[in-house]
Amino acid sequence: QVQLVESGGGLVQAGGSLTLSCVASGNILRYRAMGWYRQAPGKQRELVATITAGGDTNFADSVKGRFTVSRSIPKNTVYLKMNSLKPEDTAVYYCNAKYGSSRDVYDNWGQGTQVTVAS
């Protein structure tokens, strides 16, 4: 099973920026899509941003215009650049990779990285 390792989380003031990285132990193009989800205390895990194998991106409405998702195929790495951070962005951020067929989709998850935005 391919491992996903996140890094880049931390404490930042509101309005600041952070960039998260997710390094996969194998070729990221094997996945149908990769992306980022987050889970705040007491809330369900939610989608933040994804990028498909073809390079198409998708964002949650709450982060559109503030976050970007990108990748480095040679480095097997997906990035989440977060700008204009708000206290409500505070959560554990998880890297996700989806694989399988169009009928049966499976998930790989990283261990998560904490992002805390202070007001």
Image (cartoon, rainbow, N blue to C red):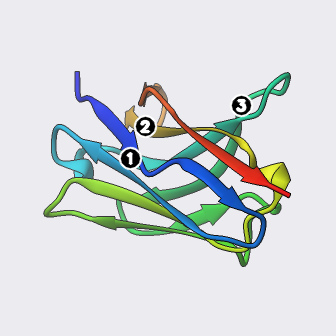
Q: CA distance from mark 2 to mark 3?
A: 16 Å
Residue under pointer 1: 32
Would you identify the image quadrant in which residue 79 lies?
Answer: bottom left
Q: Is residue 13 above or below residue 32?
A: below
Which numbered dot is residue 45?
A: 3
Residue type beneath disc 3: Arg
Which of disc 2 and disc 1 is earlier in sequence?
1
* Nearer the camera: disc 3 or disc 1: 3
Residue type beneath disc 2: Lys
Asked which secondary structure carries label 3, the reply is loop
Quadrant location of the N terminus in the rendered image: top left
Would you identify the image quadrant in which residue 45 lies?
Answer: top right
Residue 9 drawn at (x, y percent): 51, 48
Circles 1 and 2, Cβ within 8 Å, touching? The answer is yes
Residue type beneath disc 1: Arg
Which numbered dot is residue 118?
A: none
Residue at 13% x, 63% y is 74
Residue under pointer 2: 98
Q: Is residue 106 left or right of residue 53?
A: right
Residue 53 drawn at (x, y percent): 35, 58
Q: Is residue 86 left or right of residue 45?
A: right
Residue 51 drawn at (x, y percent): 47, 60
Which one is nearer the viewer's eye here, 2 or 38? 38
Give the number of callouts. Answer: 3
Quadrant location of the C terminus in the rendered image: bottom right
Q: Is residue 5 above or below residue 22?
A: above
Which of disc 1 and disc 3 is earlier in sequence?
1
Q: CA distance from mark 1 to mark 2?
A: 6 Å
Residue at 25% x, 42% y is 24
Q: CA distance from mark 3 to mark 1?
A: 20 Å
Q: Is residue 5 left or right of residue 60?
A: left
* Nearer the camera: disc 2 or disc 3: 3
